[in-house]
Amino acid sequence: MPTYEYKREDGSTFEIMQKMSEPALTTCPTTGQKVRRIISGGGGVVYKGDGWYVTDYKDGGRKSASTPPADTTDNVSSETKAEAPKTDAVKEKKS
């Protein structure tokens, strides 16, 4: 369950554990003052263990983002351009 932080009318704050499906509190359970939920920094990331390496991935490593893709798109686009006039010519003959 997550911990939510609330601020009372007098400016003091408190934390309470609630389910995510529960509605936000409108009054303090201890003092009865009006409250509103505030956004807190939350917990930081904690790294435990020896760490990770590129070889930990299933495929043995990630491909570099700087590698350009293959030139297959140029070949496909030139083929479709060459075929386009043929289909237009066929359509004109049928009309």
Image (spheres, rainbow, N blue to C red):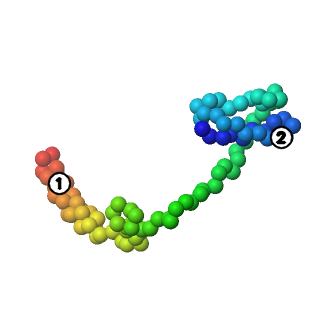
Cα distance between the residues tagged 2 and 1 = 76 Å
Residue 27: x and y in percent read 77, 28
Name the one closer to the observer, 74 or 51.
51
Amino acid under disc 1: Thr
Q: Which residue is mark 2?
A: 12
In the rendered structure, which disc, 2 or 1, sits on the residue that comes first in sequence? 2
Asked where in the image residue 81 lies, by quadrant, the reply is: bottom left
Q: Residue at x 68, y 40 (%)?
A: 4
Number of numbered tags placed on the structure image: 2
- Mark number for residue 18? none
Callout 1: SS? helix
Residue 31: x and y in percent read 83, 29
Q: Residue at x 18, y 60 (%)?
A: 83
- View extreme (right): residue: 10
Amino acid under disc 2: Ser
- Classify residue 49 as left or right of residue 24: left
Asked where in the image residue 2 lies, by quadrant, the reply is: top right
Q: Residue at x 47, y 65 (%)?
A: 52
Q: Which residue is mark 1?
A: 87
Name the one closer to the observer, 64 or 21.
21
Q: Residues within 10 Å of mark 2 (few under 14, many from 20)?
A: few
Q: Residue at x 73, y 40 (%)?
A: 15
Callout 2: SS? loop
Q: Quadrant of the N terminus?
A: top right
Name the one closer to the observer, 77 or 58.
58
Q: Nearer the viewer, mark 2 or mark 1?
A: 2
54 over 1 or under it: above or below: below
- Classify residue 27 as left or right of residue 20: right
Asked where in the image residue 29 lies, by quadrant, the reply is: top right
Q: Residues within 10 Å of mark 1 (few under 14, many from 20)?
A: few
Residue 18: x and y in percent read 64, 34
